[in-house]
Amino acid sequence: ELISKGNHRHYMLKEIYEQPVVVAQTLKSYLQRMEDRVSLPVPDFDLSAIRRVTIVACGTSFYAGMVAKYWFEQFARVPVDIDVASEFRYRAPVMEDEGLMIVISQSGETADTLAALRHARVEGQKIAAVVNVPTSSMAREADLLLPTHAGPEIGVASTKAFTCQLAVLAAFAANLARAKGRLDEKAEKELVRHLAEAPAALNAALAYDESIESMAHLVAGARDVLYLGRGPDYPLALEGALKLKEISYIHAEGYAAGEMKHGPIALIDDQVPVIVLAPSGPLFEKTVSNMQEVQARGGKVVLISDYDGVAAAGEGCIATITMPKVHPLIAPMVYAVPVQLLAYHVAVAKGTDVDQPRNLAKSVTVE
Ligand code: G6P
């Protein structure tokens, strides 16, 4: 094989560990650190005229898009519509003038996403493509190419492509915000500084690998696992559940923490591990209160948080993972690491084929 696993047992683990470097590489081409400004390729259409964004993707790339929706709406105040590519075309989506479609894809070849791009093209949308393969079909057909610099990703379950997608999308959201006069220089500098902290924070998150490995047995025996998160970290709960399903074959669901009481709480008993993603920030208390609802029903909680009092907040949890303190902007990137590592170690504990999980393909080029 052309690309070696280095010292790692699997490509997936190697790719998880590459994240600080490849995210730094990616950010380098989107941030101008001399003045702390975002610097993106200038499209041949007027960015400031964009009135609506539609994000379409599949799988892990779709969850990167879900995080990006928060950023585009928060920074640029542009409404964002998001859909999985396989649904998008078939629901007669309303595509208005001055609309921008963003497709997100590691391979740039996923059939459903490519078909969505072509549909939007016919409907007069401008197209931006966040892809990891710059020679791919999506890259060629887009008006604005925003490459991730993750390098080749071999493990079927996407890891480093995801964090690089987030890096590009955060810079793009800031860029659009600036074009629309929604981001002054001071706010832009601050945002860039926070983004630039991501590689070091990813590194710090990797330091918890061993402690995550040591708790893998808590999840490996489970039949069902629940992941909870809020705000931009809700898509991370979905991504955590997807990673676990993909490579360990354990049934897992991601849920918005506040929505749990409308259904999944009925599943909770002492056999169901619940992974709670709770970065400190405005939503922390609310997530903790959802966590306590789970505990009151005997649920076995694993708390992942950077909150100072994580030990106290995590009272009654079967495990806590104390994360490095990070700005909420980069939390979705940094919290990707523990959910990837947890899925990885659970899969290894179960003895599944981590890099080539059954029934899955790296790139799905059929509808
Ligand atoms: C497949 C892979 C996933 C990936 C999805 C989207 O299902 O197994 O890991 O997230 O395709 O792929 P893309 O190349 O479009 O990001």
Image (tube, rainbow, N blue to C red):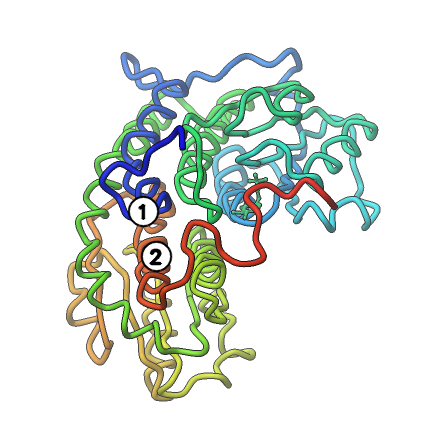
- Mark 1 residue element: helix
Pointer 2 local density, CA inside 10 Å: few below 14, some 14–19, many at least 20: many
Determine the CA span between mark 1 and mark 2.
7 Å
Q: Quadrant of ligand 1?
A: top right
Q: Quadrant of the N terminus?
A: top left
- Going 25% across and 45% down the picture, which residue do you hit? 326
In which quadrant of the rendered view does residue 153 lie? top left
**Measured from the top left, where is residue 108 in percent x and y?**
60, 31
Where does label 1 land, which residue? 13
Q: Is residue 293 above or below residue 117?
A: below
Q: Which mark is residue 231?
A: none
Question: At label 2, which amino acid type do we have?
Answer: Tyr
The residue drawn where x is 50% and y is 24% is 147
Say which residue appears at 39% left-offset and 18% top-offset.
Answer: 29
Q: Is residue 30 above or below residue 154?
A: above
* Image quadrant in which you'd find residue 227: bottom left
User: Which percent across, then down, holds residue 286?
Assistant: 37, 67
349 lies left or right of 207: right
CB under 8 Å between discs 1 and 2 = yes
User: Which of 137/94 is in front?
Assistant: 137
Percent across and percent down for residue 244 are: 43, 62
Q: Is residue 117 above or below residue 222?
A: above
* Picture coordinates of residue 362, whole percent (x, y): 54, 43
Mark sitting on residue 344: 2
Is 100 left, or right, of 248 in this rendering?
right
- Label 1 crowd (10 A; few <14 / some 14-19 / many >=20): many
Q: Work out which residue is located at the far front of the displayed protein and give it.
A: 1
First-in-chain label (1 vs 2)? 1
